[in-house]
Image (tube, coloured by chain):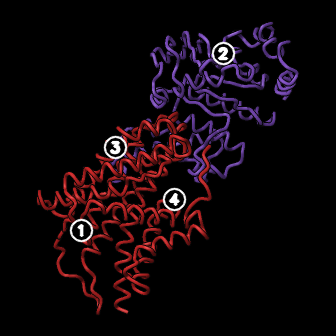
Chain colours: A purple, B red
Amino acid sequence: MALLETRMLSKSFGGLRAIQQLEMDVEEGSIHGLIGPNGSGKSTFFNLVTGVYKTDPGSVVRFAGEDITNFEAHEIGRRGVARTFQLLRLFSEMTVLQNLLVGYHTHTKYAAAAPIFRPRSVVRADQEASESMFELLSIIGLAEFADMPAGELSGGQRRLLSLGRAMAMRPKLLMLDEPAAGLSPTNVDVLMGIVLDLKKRYGLTLLIVEHILKVVMDTCDRVTVLDHGQKIGEGAPHEVKDDHAVVEAYLGKEMSDEEVRAAFAKAAR
Amino acid sequence: MEALLGFLIFGVTIGVVYGIVALGISLIYTGLDIVHFAHGEIYMFGAFLGLVFAHQYNVPYWLAILCAMIVTGLLGIVIERVFYRRLTRAGGGYTVAGMGMIICGFGMSVVLQNIAFLIWGADAEPFPVNFGMPYQIGEIFLPKSYVATAVAALVLMGGLHVFLKKTKIGLAVRAVAQNKDIAFLMGINVPLMISLIFGVACAIAAAAGVLIGPMQSVQVEMGYLMLMKAFAAAVVGGFGSLPGAILGGLLVGIFENLGAAYISGSHKDIYAFLLLILVLMFRPQGLFGVEAKVKA
């Protein structure tokens, strides 16, 4: 069954059609890759699904069978869609643990004033919260930094924390925006190892935008290729790799020398 | 010596009131990225509402503070929902919409002042509250109203601190203050949190109004000078810093009363702004302020 479905998904910014009638299914429990050259609409797609942008009329986004088209971002988040950002964007003035609790607390149910009087139910809920957050922290390897301000972490640790923060929302669908960008090959392997571990433990469905083709080819079950807001290819990684249209989109004749160089640099990294 | 102590005691008392108004201004600034120029009028409305509750409905003074806080908080939420929201939707304080927001705040201040004028008239209304005889420590008389004010202000600050640091809604408010887009994606109802921030900020301004009522009197134009002083307090302490707002309020209160004691009482209002200018010259980020608020 498809966890995330889009039908006739479109988005225009003035005259620019960033996404055009995109039909895409992300199967439950799968790892779905989304690739395409710069400006092909990957980020717009993320923003449409998470409710940051409003879709054009006629578009439909369904999550777990429910029509969530144009829901507010926080409502979509609560239904189980979480994402990371290429630029991480952590709450840098909060501690590592608090960064996670922001996401986690959207699920805890107790009255606003209750923590001040601390009835037993709140104590228990808070205990559960910190236990499950410490479990998460030890998976991503940041348990010893729980009380450190997020702004003081190293680059790699911040990336792990952004992953943890998304996981704290206990999502069904985790959307990763270029998780491996700027990491060394060893660290990419470590990170993807953690991601796969999380997937197995929590039964996630993953949607990954990634420029490093090796990551996509190695981990994804299925890949969708976008170009100019349209789907130009879809299938298993090896099928997509041999697809003529896809190769042309990445390395095609119509690209300027500069773009080709950039594409090569990205693919070779 | 006694006279100096008297000035100091009054300075501290008025200072904590400046501090809690500044606290509201800082809270709105951190939460919404806007400077709320109608906050003085919110404070004035709170004072009048406290007077109405205490004298027309004969509720006890402390309950009048609470009632005024609730009603003014709700008024603040209505103002935010109806007028400010459209502008904050378009972007916060660092955008063109943020500039519009400031002008909208000025306009709101004129509108609120005139509404208050229509309801309560232009005369200064006395707000007598019987606190009983002042405490006497040696030669020093300490009016109970001052003590009550300081205690009430401490309770408010403590309450706000616990709310922001210990509750999950406080955590959500801080997340909204740091980054609204991300907070939204993390499942936080950002518009609701912004209403809440606004309501709380207006409620504590109302408390300040009811606290200061018995010391001075309640009048339609009382908000203007308070806004200026609270603004000075917020800048002195560091804009956007909540402990800074309190400390700034205390400094402004003490500074202007020492000035009144040693230099001249008739130019009392100058000293607060003198302090403001000094702080801006030598430590422009304020005592607790961050260098500059950079948004991701």
Residue depth check, mark 4 versus mark 1: number of the one nearer the observer: 1
Q: Amino acid at mark 2?
A: Gly
Give the CA distance from mark 3 to mark 1: 26 Å
Residue B268 at what x, y percent from top left?
40, 77
Label 3–label 2 contact, CB within 8 A? no
Chain ID at mark 2: A
Q: Secondary structure at mark 2?
A: loop
The answer to whether tags 4 and 1 share a subunit is yes
- For mark 3, does the 10 Å Cα neighbourhood hold few (<14), some (14 to 19), or many (20 or more) residues? some
In this rendering, would A232 be left or right of A48?
Answer: right
Label 4–label 2 contact, CB within 8 A? no
Q: Secondary structure at mark 4?
A: loop
| Residue at 56% from the left image edge and 45% from the top image edge | B94
Q: Amino acid at mark 4?
A: Phe
Q: Amino acid at mark 3?
A: Ile
B248 or A245: nearer the eye? B248
Give the CA distance from mark 4 to mark 1: 29 Å
Q: Which residue is mark 2?
A: A229
The answer to whether tags 1 and 2 share a subunit is no
Residue depth check, mark 3 versus mark 4: number of the one nearer the observer: 3
Chain ID at mark 1: B
Q: Which residue is mark 3?
A: B79
Give the CA distance from mark 4 to mark 2: 44 Å
First along the sequence among labels 4 and 1: 1
Q: Can residue A63 be seen in this snapshot? A: yes
Give the CA distance from mark 3 to mark 2: 41 Å
First along the sequence among labels 3 and 4: 3
Q: Which residue is mark 4?
A: B239
Residue A243 at what x, y percent from top left?
78, 7
| Residue at 39% from the left image edge and 85% from the top image edge | B261
